[in-house]
Structures are given as structure tokens and as C-alpha cells.
Image (spheres, rainbow, N blue to C red):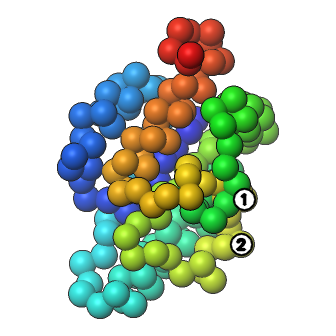
């Protein structure tokens, strides 16, 4: 199974497309929403959320992919092959979308198996969630020879 993990309260402007891809992928995807910190100070938010993420990642045996801007980019076919290869070796793959206040990489870096970038540009979290969902949907269509990927 493919999982998407992020600290998020809502999807706001991207709610409908996210729900549509979740509906299309219903049994092939799980979205894990971790609660964002309620702290006021930037440093406290980073610390609290990084510790929470670390605890979550330590207790899993998933293949962990961090969406990180300064990482490898792939076209859709490369991404499809990547996902298919990892699904043959691992029970679950999780795509981690970090959040507005960054993350303390010292706490999680060793827990990450791979880093991938959607683009050198920066996007809102909800848009990144929608983009990775759409690419996962494309991967499923490619795998099943369904007409969606053109």
C-alpha cells in the first residue's frame, strides 16, 4: 500500500481534487494526517513536529520517501518504475510531505530511505499532496493499462 504522511489540518483550496484522487485510489492509498503543533514559537513547532515524525517513522517498516526540494527529480515513467520496484520489495511505501516550518533533519535523516523532488519550485502542502496523489494515480493507470496517462 502507498501512504502519504503530512502534518496538515485541512487541504483548503485543493480539497476537491484531493478527495477525487483519494476516491479513485481508495484501496491503494492511505493518507496519514499528523496534527500540527499548536505552539507559537517557530523553533518549538519544528522541534515538536520533528520529534512526532521521528517517533512515527521509527515504529514502521515502510520504505520512506521524503519529498524534498533539493533531491532527485523523475518523469512519470521513471516514477512509475520506481514505485513498482519498491512495491515488490516493501509492504508499504510512505511519501512524507513536510510542512511549513521545516523539519529537524538531524532527527529524521537516518530514517529516510530516499528523497525525491516534485520540482525545484516550492508549492503549498495541499498542492504537493494533490500532485503526488495524481502521480500515484497515473502509476496505477500505467500498471493496469488504463487510459489516463497520455
Give above or below for 54 relative to 14.
Answer: below
> What residue does disc 2 label?
110
Residue occupying the far front of the picture: 121
83 vs 40, left or right, is right
Task: Tell me the SS state at disc 2.
Answer: helix
Answer yes or no: is residue 91 visible: no
Q: Residue at x 69, y 29 (%)?
A: 77
Q: Which residue is drawn at 66% across and 37% down?
A: 75
147 vs 63, left or right, is left
Quadrant hosting residue 18: top left
Q: Position of residue 82 (x, y in %)?
A: 73, 38
Q: In which quarter of the image is the C terminus?
A: top right
Q: In which quarter of the image is the N terminus?
A: top right
> What residue does disc 1 label?
113
Give above or below for 45 relative to 130.
Answer: below
Q: Where is residue 27 in the image (x, y as percent from the top left)?
A: 46, 26
Classed neighbour count for the residue bearing mark 2: other residues with Cα under 10 Å, few (<14), some (14–19), many (≥20): few
Mark 1–mark 2 CB contact (< 8 Å): no
Quadrant hosting residue 144: top right
Q: Position of residue 128 (x, y in %)?
A: 43, 50
Q: Where is residue 117 in the image (x, y as percent from the top left)?
A: 60, 54
27 vs 20, left or right, is right
Task: Tell me the SS state at disc 1.
Answer: loop
Q: Residue at x 63, y 65 (%)?
A: 70
Q: Which residue is drawn at 58% across and 22% down?
A: 140
Answer yes or no: is residue 2 visible: yes
Amino acid at each position: 500500500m502507498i501512504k502519504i504522511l503530512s502534518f496538515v489540518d485541512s487541504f483548503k483550496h485543493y480539497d476537491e481534487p484531493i478527495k477525487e484522487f483519494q476516491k479513485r485510489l481508495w484501496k491503494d492509498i492511505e493518507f496519514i494526517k499528523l496534527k500540527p503543533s499548536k505552539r507559537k514559537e517557530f523553533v518549538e513547532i519544528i522541534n515538536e513536529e520533528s520529534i512526532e515524525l521521528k517517533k512515527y517513522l521509527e515504529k514502521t517498516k515502510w520504505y520512506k520517501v521524503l519529498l524534498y526540494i533539493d533531491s532527485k527529480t523523475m518523469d512519470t515513467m521513471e516514477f512509475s518504475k520506481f514505485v513498482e520496484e519498491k512495491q515488490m520489495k516493501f509492504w508499504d511505501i510512505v511519501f512524507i510531505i513536510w510542512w511549513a516550518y521545516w523539519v529537524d533533519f538531524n532527527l529524521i535523516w537516518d530514517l529516510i530511505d530516499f528523497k525525491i523532488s516534485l520540482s525545484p519550485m516550492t508549492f503549498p502542502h495541499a498542492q504537493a499532496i494533490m500532485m503526488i496523489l495524481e502521480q500515484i494515480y497515473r502509476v496505477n493507470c500505467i500498471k493496469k493499462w488504463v487510459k489516463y496517462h497520455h
